[in-house]
Amino acid sequence: MRPGRSGRWNRERPAGVNGPPDMNNPPVVSGPSEVCAEAPGRVNLLGEHTDYNEGFVLPMPLGQVTRVFAARAEGMVEAYAEIFDERLVLELGRPREGTWLDYIAGCVWALAQEGIEVPGARFRIQRGVPPGAGLASSAALEIAVLRALRTLYEIPLDDLRLALIAHRAEVEYVGVRCGVMDQVVASLGRAGQALFLDARSLQHEWVPIPAGYRFVVVDSGVPRRLAEAGYNRRRAECEEAAARLGVRALRDLTPGDLERIALLPEPLGRRVRHVVTEDARVLAGVEALRSGDVRTFGRLMIESHRSLREDYEVSTVELDRLVALAVENGALGARLTGAGFGGSVVALVAEANFEAFVSSTLSQR
Ligand code: GLA
């Protein structure tokens, strides 16, 4: 059950609690008085809007991390976010109201749903992953919070289960119907490697980036617009198309099905064509990375962007412009990354061209 006004948690901001909490005097029960944990943002290299269709994705963790300091507490979750200079408190047993604290309280709630009761905690949050840039800042926050709670309360949780609990928090508590990609890569990602994930079986492997090349993220500076509504609409379209085609999920189709897919009413046909061809691009992209064929990988990125723009219709004028600019400035490939509707693009660039690429792209952006 998703906790709404009848749920177990509530946001409460008593008068005068703005500002950092006194971390030297927390109501500590036992064990470590304060722990520090962090988790990275992510950039997705290929495989957009495929995870909730039970398909394939290829994200990579970023160097930017969200860090949390946590201490034990009783009966409440309290957090101070440096980025907002705001401190919020939730008492156990009260309904939630819808603030950034939901991402943290949702983790405690999701643990409880899994039979792991945490009595409470206080947090100080340093958000190094910028929100709204399409770099999965909320997954970074959730994974950092759960890692901190795991250490604080000595909870036996492996990294994959931790990711699934974070996902449950976001879907069932916060109410965003996202796929599993962001939480899984924030939890399992390894620096400098892409994570090839099957979003149905959750089988995964790490794929190294060929030497001499870099993936560069360029933030369009335009925050995502109407992203949640657009995202949910795309999900609903995919579900409707899967039902019409008689498959459990769009993952069960292949490029061999494109003829019957074309018989669907629009825009469903184009939506499915994106998902089916994008899954195929991830499989081809993994092979290309493994064999060091960066040119093929770059071409797949450009095709992915075209498909996201024309078939899935989640790009924007600014993102299209940035992708074109990146290619003009020598990138082997570029595409929007994340859900779209704003946010960032990712480009594949030769190490030797890196400095020139960054300075010319930033000056023309
Ligand atoms: C968001 C969601 C992910 C995924 C991407 C699009 O980042 O959180 O689960 O669906 O959009 O690929």
Image (cartoon, helix red, strand yellow):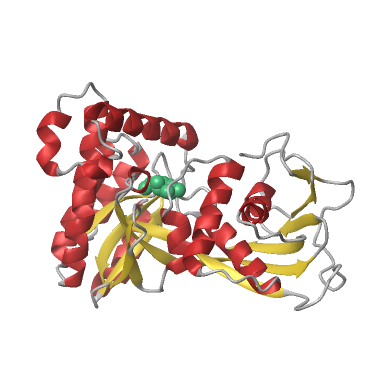
Residue 121 sits in which quadrant? bottom right
Furthest residue in direction top, as rendered: 265
Residue 205 sits in which quadrant? bottom left
Which residue is pictured at 27% across the width and 74% down the height? 351
Which residue is pictured at 60% across the width and 55% down the height? 114
Work out whether residue 340 or residue 101 is closer to the camera in this orientation and state it. 101
Which residue is pictured at 77% across the width and 78% down the height? 31
Residue 307 sits in which quadrant? top left
The quadrant of the image that shows the N terminus is: top right
Q: Is residue 159 left or right of residue 44?
A: right
The spot of residue 122 in percent (x, y) is 76, 62
The spot of residue 16 in percent (x, y) is 89, 50
The spot of residue 22 in percent (x, y) is 85, 67
Asked whether residue 129 is in view, the answer is no
Q: Is residue 233 left or right of residue 102?
A: left
Q: Is residue 305 left or right of residue 219?
A: left
The spot of residue 272 in percent (x, y) is 24, 35
Asked whether residue 99 is in view, the answer is yes
In the figure, 89 relative to 232: above or below?
A: below
Furthest residue in direction front, as rendered: 115
Which residue is pictured at 30% across the width and 40% down the height? 249
Work out whether residue 236 or residue 354 is closer to the camera in this orientation and state it. 236
Number of marks in picture? 0
